Amino acid sequence: MKNILFIALLLPQILLAQFQITNHPPEGNDYFTIVTPKNSNTSIFFDSADYKVVHKISQLFATDIEMISGNKPILLSNYCKLNGNIIIIGTIGKNQLIDQLIAEKKLKAYNIHNKWERFLIQTIDKPFKGVQKALVIAGSDRRGTAYGVFTLSENMGVSPWYWWADVPVKMSGELYVEDLSYISKAPSVKYRGIFINDEDWGLQPWASKNMDTGIKDIGPKTYTRVCELLLRLKGNMFAPAMHSCTGPFYSYPKNKRVADEYGIIITTSHCKPLLFNNASKKEWDSERDGEWNYTTNKEVILKKLDDRIYEASSYENIYTVGMRGLHDEGLRGDHLAGEKVEILTQVIADQRNILEKHLNKPAEEIQQIFVPCKETMEIYELGLEIPEDVTLVWVDDNYGYIKRLSNPKEQKRSGGAGVYYHLSYLGTPHDYLWLNTTPPVLMYEELKKAYDVGANRYWLINVGDIKPAELGMQTFFDFAWDVDKYDFSRINRHQSQYLASIFGDHYKERFQDIMDTYYRLAWSRKPEFMGWEREWDRNKELEQLANTEYSFRHYNDARQRLADYKRI
């Protein structure tokens, strides 16, 4: 049973179970005591020289144990105070105890050493003088360490959604883990993250009133919670909120430090080159800065981009290269097709020069993405040549269908490929209805298709306000972490099983019926597209959303739809 994970103290935990954790001592002595009613003498050790994220997750892990049991373990970073049972949390090469255990061949870390975001969890009897037993959580890098800690937390009963969605913590006065030697797999997708978009009517007002009240905006306190959530979901990046109602991410200096302290990478969407948010007048004001037009105002634009990379270059980022118009508009200027290719070619060359200047290494060694979205896709297909090392990030059509994937030639690129995908796209005319209506099976079909032709470098999902996209996010991150674990049947039952793990296994089939019906109704016509129409002209691009009504006069159409919604 050592490498099989069950959780006896919890309701059935679908897709979570990874080791044997119980609320009573297993038979024999082959177990580690995490906590008892007397709190035993278990403590948590982390090395003060380790990454800041390790300090933070060690503290969060102690709090997780306290939420479960009422007892909080002692946190130690002093080697002289080790005794009894200890939980050792650390990164290989950054924790002296872990490095010593590896050198003495007591810790089997060769499978994860120098690997990307891997971790091991192992129990060791009498590892040091005065220490009875150790539970070691070792990461190959700083995020690997975090994933190992939060994997254990989730199995003990702390959901990633304990704060954002108030999922109750499973209470128990005792926690024991059977002896084990567990090694994680490599994540299927290298970069996995969210884009906080359309925050105007949810996240921004809420954060300004409840979180970052001093600045009345989305700021470091809110992003602290976002970063913690991402680590608990095994994510590693996010694209910050960007609308004009929100202060730009870099306008609050602590934002980037918070992300770095949690080991989270900052990325941006298709419309923000080199981390620069031109949707905000604080970043780009046409009255102050002139037109966002590369052919007529190149010097000012390059100065803005240069300043941003100077400010952000010491942190871990993924840089969007290329250029569109302001916010979500097309490239500014009345240019012929061939001229657009020439302009973007020069734009990308200039941007890469800025990156090399401030990061002090060749552009080929700097993680960059190019997102051929909307009119940029047309320019790309006209012959725009993107440097070999830049990751091509394919987009969906806002209905969940990916518009294009890598052809055989593109599959050979050193930069690989990725996907920018939507859970949330549009609201109603009054801009208050933002729903997660993308079915898990469609998400699986499209992302798996992309993955199979090489899009395994970068997956970014647009989640709107985070709420109410929690289930979609959970499915996305579980899938991105282990693509091979799922097929059509498993992905379709993923959300009902996850809900049953919270509310009770006896509700599982009812949850499945609710979710199947919800997605069927939402997909026959997205709720945000019901009963209204609009059209706009963005640089000669026309988009129209049809006024779709269900008939109250024919075929009992509307009444049946309302009845189906009422039933669930």
Image (tube, rainbow, N blue to C red):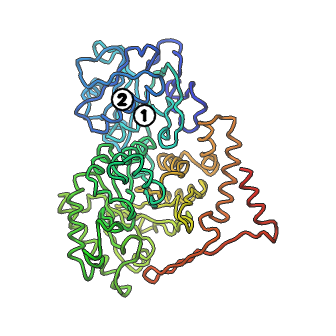
Q: Is residue 55 above or below residue 86?
A: below
Q: Is residue 184 above or below residue 62?
A: below
Of the pair 67 and 478, the residue shown nearer to us: 67
- Can I make out residue 419 in this image? no
Of the pair 525 and 203, the residue shown nearer to us: 203
Q: For the residues marked 1 and 2, what is the alpha-carbon distance in whole angstroms?
A: 9 Å
Could you tell me which secondary element the residue under label 1 belongs to?
strand
Q: Residue 483 at x, y = what percent?
A: 51, 49
Q: Residue 404 at x, y = what percent?
A: 49, 69
The residue that disc 2 covers is: 108
Q: Is residue 543 above or below residue 492?
A: below
Horizontal side of 150 relative to 342 (left or right) equals right
- Can I make out residue 92 in this image? yes
Residues at discs 1 and 2 in contact (Cβ within 8 Å): yes
Residue type indicated by callout 1: Ile
Residue type indicated by callout 2: Lys
The residue that disc 1 covers is: 183
Q: Is residue 69 above or below residue 470?
A: above
Could you tell me which secondary element the residue under label 2 belongs to?
loop
Q: Residues within 10 Å of mark 2 (few under 14, many from 20)?
A: some
Q: Residue 245 at x, y = what percent?
A: 39, 62
Q: Earlier in the sequence, mark 1 or mark 2?
A: 2
